[in-house]
Image: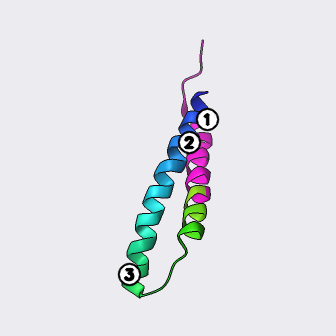
Amino acid sequence: MRLIMANITAAFWALILGEVLGYICGQLDILTISPVTMGVLSIVMGLFAANAFSWITKSAEAPSK
């Protein structure tokens, strides 16, 4: 259950930050962005980054006794 909640939290924050970053970049370059595409891409990249970070650092955890 902890993994599911961590992924839901990561997806939520990736969506929020991705939409904000997409809006800012769209205004700076005067481009039109699709909010749905930006949201889906940011969620996918956020989940990939969060799970990759978790997987990479798993070997650094202390072994359980």
Secondary structure beneath dot 1 equals: helix
Asked if labels 1 and 2 touch by Cβ distance under 8 angstroms, the answer is: yes
Q: Which residues are magenta?
A: 44-65
| Residue drawn at x 57%, y 28% as measured from the top left | 2
Under circle 2, the secondary element is helix
**Callout 3, which amino acid?**
Gln
* Crowd class of label 3 (few under 14; some 14 to 19; many from 20; radius 10 Å): few
Q: Amino acid at mark 1?
A: Ile
Q: Residue at x 55, y 54 (%)?
A: 46
Q: Which residue matches tag 2?
A: 8
**Residue 60 magenta:** yes
**For this rendering, which residue is in front, 47 or 11?**
11
Q: Earlier in the sequence, mark 2 or mark 3?
A: 2
Q: Is residue 24 above or below residue 14?
A: below
Q: CA distance from mark 3 to mark 1?
A: 34 Å
**Please, what is the three-letter code of the amino acid marked with disc 2?**
Ile
Residue wearing tag 3: 27
**Which colour style is shown?**
rainbow
Q: Disc 1 designates what residue?
A: 4
Asked which secondary structure carries label 3, the reply is helix
User: Going by the picture, which residue comes out furthest to the bottom?
Assistant: 30
Tell me the crowding category of disc 1: few under 14, some 14 to 19, or many 20 or more residues within 10 angstroms, Cα based: few
Circles 3, 1 touching at the beta carbon (< 8 Å): no
| Magenta-span inclusion, residue 64 | yes
Q: CA distance from mark 2 to mark 1?
A: 6 Å
Tell me the quadrant of the picture where the N terminus can be found.
top right
Against 41, residue 3 (above or below) is above
Q: Quadrant of residue 63?
A: top right
**13 relative to 63 in the view: left or right:** left
